[in-house]
Image: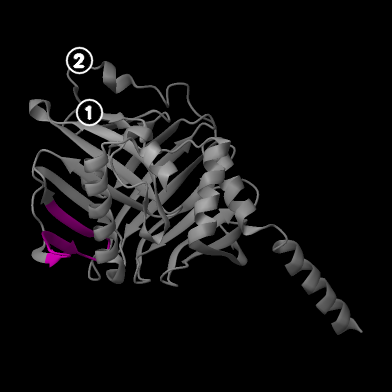
């Protein structure tokens, strides 16, 4: 009888744990991104070299109103570096050379509709499961697994706080299923007390500080002349223009499958060839591959192109052919993206 009671309680406990839908957890994670105040120490590890893991440690802060600060503690060459992000711009201050680099925010603030579109992409391209509940840093977390429907490989694993819905640890895997990166807190405080000037940009006011500003301008996606969809479920989500020297412009198309990103660059300036020259579908390209990503560089009609992302080996040719075909069609039709989509 006692065993039956214990079994019943155990089953009830497990059912309670997993009662929350995995996509609801992701939705709450996206909603809470930027609105939860905290301070903590974050460790980032890159596993791109099996003989040497690249590790950085930083003190991180969030004021709960889309303001972030990161103070690097290690390695030595990053010590003292400060990054501030207000959701619109990112300010990266390097005190060793007294330079501040201003670029568009690396933090993504999504609207309710954008969150739902991302959820739709993830549903379309990934098998998402709640692996188990764990205790991490003394807090209960949901361990969420993202497995590609195309490669059947694990792509990401997140430890999401069951109360605050922020990720306390994230492991990244490449298209071969090998771990390539990890970001995790080793301590975190959800009741922080900040000094008044913690998020101030005082270093910009120093007349001796050199300012380098990114010339990246976001454009309307409807004006893009690039494929809207790519194999593996990738969708065009951002379109930018990069203002180069001599008034040259490079277009940057950012794709997402809900978890991973893929980038396509198009410009009048040649990209530095990396990798080996090979032939794909009758076109000579430079192809490079490592544990983190693959890249393809080619020239077409006096334009230079760079495609980069973690593409599975058996999809490299498929994606390249799709890009080439769509670019050729757009060049002939000279039509905006929105019209081309309607005609599909």
Task: Give the answer, above or below, for where 65 lies relative to 30.
Answer: above
| Residue that appears at 22% across and 70% down | 51
Residue at the extreme right of the image, as rendered = 1
Q: Which residues are magenta?
A: 279-298
Quarter of the image where one finds residue 98: top left
The quadrant in which residue 296 appears is bottom left
Q: Would residue 127 be visible to someone looking at this image?
A: yes
Q: Decide whether the magenta segment is chiefly helix, strand or loop.
A: strand
Are there few (<14), some (14-19), or many (20+) residues within 10 Å of tag 1?
Answer: some
Question: What numbered label is drawn on residue 185?
Answer: none
Q: Residues within 10 Å of mark 2 (few under 14, many from 20)?
A: few
User: In the rendered image of this protein, does residue 76 appear above or below residue 220?
Assistant: below
| Number of the front mark, 1 or 2 | 1
Residue 284 lies in the magenta-colored region: yes
Q: How many numbered callouts? A: 2
Q: Which residue is mark 2?
A: 207
Residue 151 drawn above or below residue 72? below
The numbered mark, 1 or 2, whose residue comes first in the sequence reads 2
Q: Assess whether residue 77 is covered by the magenta stretch.
A: no
Which residue occupies 10% across, 66% down?
278
* Residue where numbered disc 1 is placed: 215
* Residue 39 percent location from the top left of the image: 49, 40
Q: Report how far apart the C-alphas of labels 1 and 2 lie in the structure.
A: 22 Å
Q: Nearer the viewer, residue 319 or 275?
A: 319
Do tag 1 and tag 2 residues touch (Cβ < 8 Å)?
no
On the image, the x and y values in percent for residue 52 come to 23, 66
Q: Residue at x 29, y 71 (%)?
A: 314
Side of 84 relative to 159 (left or right): left
- Disc 1 secondary structure class: loop
Left/right placement of residue 208 relative to residue 185 reads: left
Q: Is residue 158 visible?
A: no
Which residue is nearer to you in this view: 270 or 59?
270
């Amino acid at each position: 009888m006692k065993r039956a009671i214990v079994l019943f309680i155990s089953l009830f406990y497990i059912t309670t744990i997993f009662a929350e839908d995995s996509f609801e957890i992701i939705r709450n994670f996206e909603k809470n991104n930027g609105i939860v105040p905290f301070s903590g120490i974050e460790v980032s590890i890159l596993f791109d070299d099996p003989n040497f893991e690249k590790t950085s440690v930083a003190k991180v802060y969030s004021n709960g109103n889309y303001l972030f600060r990161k103070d690097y503690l290690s390695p030595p060459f990053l010590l003292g570096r400060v990054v501030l992000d207000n959701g619109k711009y990112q300010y990266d201050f390097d005190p060793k050379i007294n330079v501040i680099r201003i670029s568009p925010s690396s933090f993504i603030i999504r609207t309710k509709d954008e969150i739902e579109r991302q959820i739709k992409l993830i549903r379309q391209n990934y098998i998402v499961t709640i692996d188990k509940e764990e205790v991490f840093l003394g807090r209960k977390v949901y361990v969420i697994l993202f497995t590609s429907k195309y490669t059947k490989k694990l792509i990401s694993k997140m430890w999401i706080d069951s109360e605050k819905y922020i990720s306390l640890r994230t492991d990244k895997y490449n298209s071969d299923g090998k771990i390539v990166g990890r970001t995790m807190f080793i301590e975190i405080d959800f009741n922080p007390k900040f000094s008044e000037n913690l998020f101030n940009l005082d270093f910009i006011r120093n007349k001796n500080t050199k300012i380098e500003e990114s010339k990246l301008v976001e454009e309307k996606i409807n004006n893009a002349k690039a494929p809207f969809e790519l194999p593996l479920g990738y969708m065009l989500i951002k379109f930018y223009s990069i203002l180069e020297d001599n008034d040259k412009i490079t277009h940057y198309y950012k794709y997402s499958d809900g978890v991973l990103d893929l980038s396509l660059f198009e410009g009048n300036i040649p990209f530095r060839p990396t990798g080996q020259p090979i032939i794909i579908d009758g076109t000579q390209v430079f192809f490079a591959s490592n544990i983190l990503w693959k890249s393809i560089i080619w020239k077409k009609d006096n334009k230079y192109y760079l495609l980069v992302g973690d593409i599975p080996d058996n999809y490299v040719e498929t994606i390249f052919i799709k890009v080439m075909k769509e670019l050729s069609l757009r060049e002939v039709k000279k039509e905006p993206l929105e019209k081309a989509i309607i005609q599909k």
